Amino acid sequence: MRITFLGTGTSCGVPVIGCRCEVCQSSNAKDRRLRCSILVETEQTRLLVDCGPDFRQQILPQPFRRIDGILITHSHYDHVGGMDDVRPYCQFGEINVYADPLARRGMLEMLPYCFAENRYPGVPAIGLHEIHAGEEMTIGDISVLPFQVMHGKLPILGYRFGRFAYITDMKTISDDQARLLEGVETLVVNALRFDRPHHSHQLVGDAVAFARQIGARRTLLTHVCHDIGLHDEVNSRLLPPGVELAYDGQVLTV
């Protein structure tokens, strides 16, 4: 299974508009971060996790082939704001989108014209499906297990694909949901920055502790902001063994 990081930044992206910090002014491509999203692919199946406002820019370099499903973590704009841009992929047929009840309701409110009884010609053909944490499903030849994490007070979804798991925007997770991650070897998890606690996001220390809790062998940090520091410096000096910053365009085989 092939994982491609389409974006690894927070809701503002990196560089942040108007910011003159060393990260936002960096010439290193790994310090430039679009909003969070990944592709999960096999030879037969292609899944997208989240479809934020940078989707068009993110997907243009990728081969043009069918998207078999879009898995939504939650309906905040930085995770679903690019949904209208899936229109070219509707030539392969209706696109199935999977979301928990809260995210499903949010998408109906945000994109009502996509789900109207009499749709405007040319809007994306989306099949919106309700899913629930702990209920495993199969899309094509990929097994998907949604699980619940807390984004502050908001319950959202993470996704497990075999021994790989993907989480964004987590602040906490319950013990029963953490048990669904037993046996995960490669973990992608959010880590906003090193210090200054946030009400709804983990810091790097929280992410490292969580990775150790579930026993992940390799952990990649995503949904990071410019305050985390320069990519190369963080990876070479500031993270423990087995933990690294992910970067846009990075590809994993799991």
Image (tube, grey):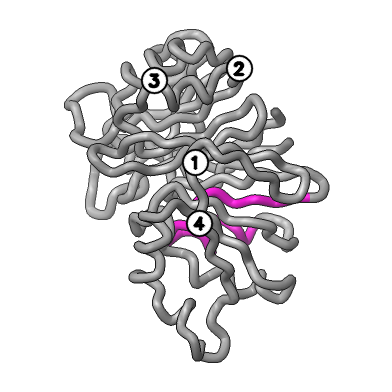
Q: Position of residue 145 (x, y in %)?
A: 58, 37
Separation of marks 4 and 3 at Cα, in angstroms = 24 Å
Identify the mark at residue 175; answer none if there is no mark. Answer: 3
Q: Nearer the viewer, residue 51 or 236?
A: 51
Q: Secondary structure at mark 3?
A: helix
Residue at point 66% right, 71% down?
94
Image coordinates for residue 234, horizontal then vertical, percent: 40, 21
How far apart are the two marked residues, 2 and 4, measured between alpha carbons? 26 Å
- In three-dimensional space, the C-alpha distance between marks 1 and 4, rounded to whole angstroms, equals 37 Å
The residue that appears at 63% across and 56% down in the rendered structure is 69
Q: Disc 2 versus disc 3: distance between alpha carbons? A: 15 Å
Q: Relative to 81, does residue 214 appear above or below in the rendering? A: above
SS at mark 4 in the image: strand
Mark 3: amino acid: Asp
Magenta-colored stretch includes residue 54 = yes
Query: Relative to 88, is 224 above or below?
Result: above
How far apart, in angstroms, are the residues tagged by discs 1 and 3? Answer: 38 Å
Quick one: 54 or 199, which is closer to the camera?
Answer: 199
In percent of width and height, residue 154 lies at 28, 44
Q: Please provide the residue range marked out in magenta.
A: 45-61
Read off the residue under disc 4: 130
Q: Nearer the viewer, mark 1 or mark 3?
A: 3
Q: On the picture, is 172 further left or further right than 63?
A: left
Q: Which label is found at residue 183?
A: 2
Quarter of the rendering containing residue 126: bottom right
Using the rendered image of the protein, determine whether residue 247 is visible from the camera's viewpoint. no
Question: If you read the primary sequence from the N terminus, does the residue marked by circle 1 or circle 4 appear first?
Answer: 1
In screen coordinates, is 45 left or right of 191? right
- Quarter holding the N terminus is top right
